[in-house]
Image (spheres, rainbow, N blue to C red):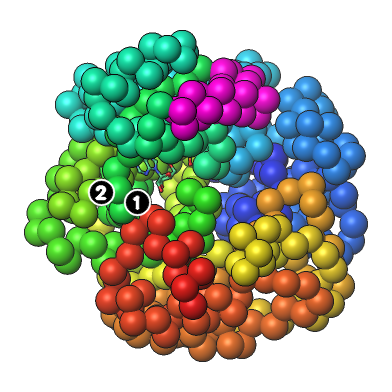
């Protein structure tokens, strides 16, 4: 295995990666903006380094500085986690040029998939259905209107470089489309340095289903089944589960989607962990929307149903080991993950940074908490306000819901507003229990209840 691995990240995912490294890597050193003795992730690791001031552009996005720490401290591998530099081709290239192993796919495939318009074209070529829409980018407003008139409304304008729900707007008529074009171009430019946009059919009431894939250096590609991430706000996930409740409605859908994901990954000669995201229409048609070339936030639900450690698999694949056979993998039981955020569901899910006074995590059989916080701790406005990921595993979906409800009751987070109570109510909701929801459902539910 590796001798020493730098985790170029912070928070819960840094802690998560270090945990696996403790079993597999001789020594590791996560980078951290503030290596106070009280944060979980630097404490878990053998060494911790200050990368810079809290603002990400000066710390976690500072490629030169992170590289320097890795080199100065004698690391032979770098794990990027998710977000931050995890999908930055320039970073991947720099890490490899410096003679270290980057835990992830090639810079080329990352750049290809990072451009969502290009990824759509690639998926189409690989025979994978994409959401009907423009062929490539449309950057002229009049051309966009002309396209939409013949294609039909509603359309979704999307920034090619978009992510995290940023740079995406629905338009149901011309005036809204012109506004959406301007806004997405502006957001694309300001958030990602790329003003390119494209248009897709806006699929009404879809479900978000994604397939976890893995590729190795020997040309093998396997899938680790699906995750359903339809409970969202602002096009961002709040609850994820595996298996997906929607699969019960459409026999054969899982196999078809998994095959499409494997085909696409094979066509891209994909190595390491990746996720192919689809939306599924109420009629059971599925369409590719994008590929994420990294470990996902919601990977714990896949770990719970497959019994695999995805970070371990990432490290082994990066070392050149072959993946396990597809036929050896199975989905066992049901896993649900609730993302606990410092945010207020009653005030449009606005972030509520603040000071955590008391903090007690739930424990027990089938309960897993991934967190990077503790009591007497600040949730700052500098980063995503996620406090923890609470995941449970049980024999059935109903048993998992019950286990989640109990774990949420036990979870004490004092001092600031969180979405814990919302999750708790959801676990008892009849529609949630029936698995009867879509990507816009949570926002409607919060308003109605
Ligand atoms: P991002 O990269 O910003 O996360 P995605 O393309 O992955 O954007 O889409 C995020 C979410 O937006 C999806 O889970 C779904 O809720 C919604 N969405 C995306 N494309 C469509 C579409 N064509 N029709 C309806 N909803 C969509």
State the image coordinates of residue 44 (x, y, percent, origin top left): 74, 60
State the image coordinates of residue 13 (x, y, percent, origin top left): 62, 53
> Which residue is nearer to you in this view: 142 or 135?
142
> Residues under labels 1 and 2: Cα distance?
6 Å
Task: Tell me the element at label 1.
Answer: strand
* Mark sitting on residue 208: 1
**329, above or below 185, in the image:** below
- Residue 190 forms part of the magenta stretch: yes
The answer to whether the beta carbon of the residue marked 1 is less than 8 Å from any atom of ligand 1 is: yes
**Residue depicted at 48% across the width and 49% down the height:** 235
Q: Quadrant of the N terminus?
A: top right
- Residue 356 forms part of the magenta stretch: no
Give the labeled residue for mark 2.
280
Magenta segment, which residues?
175-195
**414, above or below 227, in the image:** below
Mark 2 or mark 1, which is nearer the start of the sequence?
1
**52, above or below 428, in the image:** above
Q: Residues at badges 1 and 2 in contact (C-beta under 8 Å)? A: yes
State the image coordinates of residue 2 (x, y, percent, origin top left): 59, 40
């Amino acid at each position: 295995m590796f001798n020493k691995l730098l985790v170029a990240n912070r928070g819960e995912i840094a802690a998560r990666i270090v945990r696996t490294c403790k079993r597999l890597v001789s020594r590791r050193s996560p980078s951290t903006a503030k290596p106070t003795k009280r944060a979980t992730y630097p404490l878990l690791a053998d060494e911790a380094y200050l990368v810079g001031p809290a603002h990400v552009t000066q710390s976690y996005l500072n490629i030169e500085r992170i590289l320097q720490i890795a080199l100065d401290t004698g690391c032979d591998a770098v794990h990027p986690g998710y977000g931050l530099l995890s999908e930055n081709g320039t970073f991947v290239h720099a890490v490899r040029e410096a003679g270290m192993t980057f835990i992830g796919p090639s810079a080329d495939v990352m750049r290809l998939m990072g451009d969502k318009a290009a990824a759509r074209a690639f998926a189409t070529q690989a025979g994978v259905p994409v959401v009907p829409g423009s062929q490539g980018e449309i950057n002229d407003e009049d051309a966009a209107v002309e396209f939409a008139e013949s294609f039909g409304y509603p359309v979704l304008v999307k920034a090619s470089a978009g992510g995290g729900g940023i740079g995406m707007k629905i338009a149901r008529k011309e005036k809204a489309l012109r506004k959406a074009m301007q806004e997405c171009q502006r957001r694309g430019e300001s958030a990602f340095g790329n003003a390119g946009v494209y248009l897709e059919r806006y699929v009404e009431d879809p479900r978000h289903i994604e397939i976890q894939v893995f590729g190795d250096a020997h040309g093998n590609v396997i899938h680790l089944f699906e995750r359903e991430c339809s409970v969202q706000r602002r096009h961002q996930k709040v609850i994820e589960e595996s298996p997906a409740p929607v699969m019960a409605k459409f026999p054969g859908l899982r196999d078809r989607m998994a095959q499409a994901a494997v085909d696409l990954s094979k066509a891209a000669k994909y190595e390491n962990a990746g996720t192919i995201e689809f939306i599924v229409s109420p009629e059971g048609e599925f369409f590719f929307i994008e590929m994420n070339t990294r470990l996902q936030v919601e990977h714990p639900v896949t770990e719970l149903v497959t019994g695999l450690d995805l970070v371990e698999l990432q490290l082994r694949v990066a070392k050149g080991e072959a993946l396990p056979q597809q036929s050896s993998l199975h989905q066992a039981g049901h896993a649900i993950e609730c993302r606990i955020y410092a945010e207020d569901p009653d005030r449009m899910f606005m972030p509520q940074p603040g000071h955590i006074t008391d903090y007690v995590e739930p424990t027990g059989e089938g309960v897993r908490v991934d967190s990077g916080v503790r009591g007497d701790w600040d949730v700052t406005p500098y980063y995503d306000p996620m406090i923890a990921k609470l995941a449970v595993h049980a024999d059935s979906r109903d048993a998992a819901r019950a286990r989640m409800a109990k774990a949420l009751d036990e979870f004490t987070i004092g001092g600031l507003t969180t979405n814990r109570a919302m999750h708790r109510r959801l676990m008892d909701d009849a529609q949630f229990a029936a698995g009867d929801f879509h990507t816009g459902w949570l926002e409607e539910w919060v308003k109605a209840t």
